[in-house]
Image (cartoon, coloured by chain):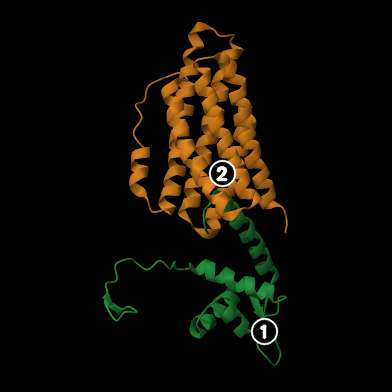
Chain colours: A green, B orange
């Protein structure tokens, strides 16, 4: 039971409306952030830009590195950039996204 | 005209398959199957008409018109039904879809008002959905898809009118071709490098 502003108790009737992002969507959001940051993004930037928790950020960065779409390029600080494979993937995804969106479907 | 429409339908189906492979989003698989069926239907309808014309309307071959149109009609109903399902699935409104996908008795029929009305009914729903999508997105690609389905709906209205007056037959084909050309324009825009 959730107390409302008048101190009364409201029954949770509706299901939560928030939609879960797929793993692919999270990967793409992270890669978009890196691209937006002139292909040189610090982990904090990616964390805020892709709206992730620290644990998930670390996990997904490792996965993206293993997939070969991003690479760690910083010497002193950790900085991530997209690889050629990552740039090509993002271009493909962009065309797929605009195709699906033209029909009103989400990817 | 059917051959051009067939090629464009297959190109849309290919793009939808590519999108499905990347995203694993089922609605895109339905879009792919839908356009494969639309393309196959158009090809069979076109080929059967061509064969009949080549044998100069020999009476023995006239049944091919019926067979070709039956396959074309069934393919279109299933294809547009799949699209309706995809849109309804996205809107989580499955009950309306089941009603829309009513079973169709398999008979060899020629183009008639009932079959055209079924297709118009499905196309109006799809055109409305793409129209809503355009009103939300306000981008050119959504407008092209909306224009395409509106044009296909108009084409079937002309096919319906053709059952009364043969004069409407070429207009129907022109509207159908125009619809597919709009889809081609959308495909070219989507695939142009950023």
Q: Is residue B124 above or below residue B55?
A: below
* Residue nearest the viewer, comparing B23 with A51: A51
Q: Chain of mark 2?
A: B
**Residue B98: assigned label:** none
Q: Is residue A57 above or below residue A35?
A: below
Q: Is residue A8 above or below residue A90?
A: below
* Residue nearest the viewer, comparing B14 with B109: B109
Q: How many marks?
A: 2
Q: Callout 1 environment at 10 Å: few (<14), some (14 to 19), or many (20+)?
A: some
Q: Residue at x 52, y 79 (%)?
A: A52
Which quarter of the image is occupied by the C terminus of chain B?
bottom right
Give the residue furthest to the bottom. A76
Q: Secondary structure at mark 1?
A: loop
Cα gap from disc 1 to disc 2, whole angstroms: 40 Å
Image location (x, y in percent) of residue B177: 63, 31
Q: Callout 2 environment at 10 Å: few (<14), some (14 to 19), or many (20+)?
A: many
Circle 2 residue: B13
Which quarter of the image is occupied by the N terminus of chain B?
top right
Q: Is residue B17 visible?
A: no
Image location (x, y in percent) of residue A1: 27, 77
Q: Is residue B68 visible?
A: yes
Q: Secondary structure at mark 2?
A: helix
* Residue nearest the viewer, comparing B66 with A99: A99
Image location (x, y in percent) of residue A38: 73, 75
Q: Chain of mark 1?
A: A
Circle 1 residue: A79
* Residue nearest the viewer, comparing B153 with B10: B153
- Label 1 close to label 2 by CB (< 8 Å): no
Q: Residue at x 65, y 87 (%)?
A: A78
């Amino acid at each position: 039971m959730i107390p409302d502003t008048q101190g009364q108790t409201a029954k949770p009737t509706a299901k939560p409306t928030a939609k879960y992002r797929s793993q692919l969507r999270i990967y793409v959001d992270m890669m978009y952030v890196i691209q937006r940051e002139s292909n040189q993004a610090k982990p904090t930037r990616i964390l805020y830009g892709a709206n992730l928790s620290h644990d998930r950020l670390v996990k997904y960065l490792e996965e993206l590195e293993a997939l070969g779409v991003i690479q760690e390029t910083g010497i002193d600080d950790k900085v991530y950039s997209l690889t050629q494979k990552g740039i090509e993937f993002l271009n493909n995804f962009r065309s797929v996204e605009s195709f699906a969106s033209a029909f009103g479907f989400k990817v | 005209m059917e051959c051009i429409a067939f090629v464009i339908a297959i190109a849309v189906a290919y793009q939808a398959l590519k999108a499905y492979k990347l995203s694993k989003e089922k609605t895109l698989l339905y879009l792919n199957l839908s356009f494969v069926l639309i393309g196959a239907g158009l090809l069979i309808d076109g080929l059967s008409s061509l064969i009949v014309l080549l044998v100069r309307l020999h009476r023995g071959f006239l049944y091919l018109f019926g067979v070709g149109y039956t396959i074309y009609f069934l393919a279109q109903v299933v294809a547009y039904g799949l699209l309706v399902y995809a849109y309804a699935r996205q809107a989580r409104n499955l009950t309306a879809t089941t009603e829309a996908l009513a079973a169709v008795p398999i008979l060899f029929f020629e183009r008639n008002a009932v079959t055209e009305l079924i297709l118009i009914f499905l196309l109006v729903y799809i055109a409305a959905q793409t129209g809503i999508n355009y009103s939300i997105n306000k981008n050119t690609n959504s407008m092209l898809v909306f224009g395409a389905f509106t044009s296909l709906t108009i084409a079937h209205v002309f096919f319906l009118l053709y059952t009364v007056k043969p004069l409407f037959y070429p207009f129907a084909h022109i509207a159908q071709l125009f619809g597919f050309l709009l889809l081609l324009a959308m495909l070219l825009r989507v695939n142009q490098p950023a």
